[in-house]
Image (spheres, grey):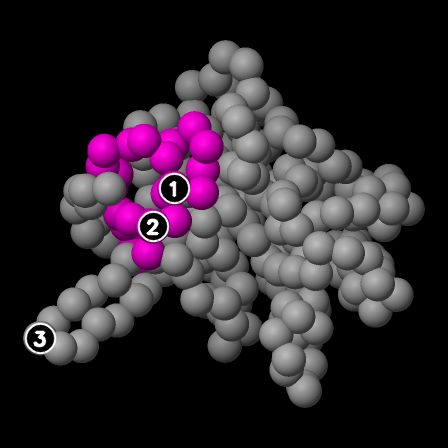
Amino acid sequence: MCSFESFERLSMEIVTPRGRTLLIADPHIGFELSRGLRIRTHFEERLAEFITEKDPDLLILLGDIKEPIGLSFTMKRLLMGFFSDLRGIPTIITKGNHDGRIEEVAQKFSHVKVAEHVLIGGFLFLHGHRNLPEVEFSEGYLGHIHPAYTFKSGGTSRKTKVFFRVGRFLILPTINPFIEGFDVRQGIKMVPFLKDSREGEAFLPEGIYLGRVPL
């Protein structure tokens, strides 16, 4: 499941004034600790390998880097390993609701910075769980809701992760292949500044346009 191809599909690279900028949302490192799994998936190690192979000029992690809201010894060790494995790639974390005390680890790495949001050349990057900052921007990128779309046929249904656009905002799916998404029609209500939106547009990770989705 943790293949280069799956990470490629669930991430996004854009060009900003900082160069090639890799966007990744909601990795939820340490999810095994909170979900009762008895095995280690080593997901964060595979993700770091993907990032270093992509070798972006800038990495932006759109929040919820970790799953447990607290910072146990084990969680700290996993984060230390992950940030070390990034090998100095400039990294900005837009802090999410699961990222309590993440600064305690990030401050040990000169290439990792933590912010509530970041504005680069008209692009706004944030997690999406708080109110919209009062800044001027042309395009916004966020995570938080793990967008997915539910296909229904007869008596069966199947949920698949999507990229979801609402106006100037693009919401990225969780890059963690072990975590299922939320149907966008419910998930959008978790974004304070988008909860009253009437519709959005869904795209499969392969780039296929699914069309407009009433919310």
Labelled pair 2, 1 in contact (Cβ < 8 Å): yes
The amino acid on which the numbered mark 2 sits, given as a three-letter code, is Gln
Which element type, helix, strand or loop, lies under badge 1? helix
Q: Residue at x 71, y 55 (%)?
A: 69
Report which residue position mark 2 lands on.
186
User: Is 91 positioned to the left or the right of 25 in the image?
Assistant: right
Residue 2: x, y in percent? 54, 73
Q: Residue at x 77, y 56 (%)?
A: 70
Q: Earlier in the sequence, mark 2 or mark 3?
A: 3
Instruction: Using the rendered view, name the quadrant where residue 118 is placed.
Output: top right
Residue 214: x, y in percent? 19, 42
Q: Nearer the viewer, residue 196 or 7?
A: 196
Q: How many numbered badges does the structure rendering display? A: 3
Judge the density around disc 3: few (<14), some (14-19), many (≥20) Cα neighbours within 10 Å.
Answer: few
Residue 127 visible in the snapshot: yes
Q: Which mark is residue 65?
A: none
Residue 188 is inside the magenta segment: yes
Which residue, as the protein is rendered here, is positioned at the far bottom?
38
Q: Which mark is residue 154?
A: 3
In the rendered structure, which segment of residues is drawn in magenta? Answer: 183-206
Residue 189: x, y in percent? 38, 41
Q: What's the distance in space between the residues labelled 2 and 3, CA to CA?
A: 22 Å
Report which residue position mark 1 lands on.
189
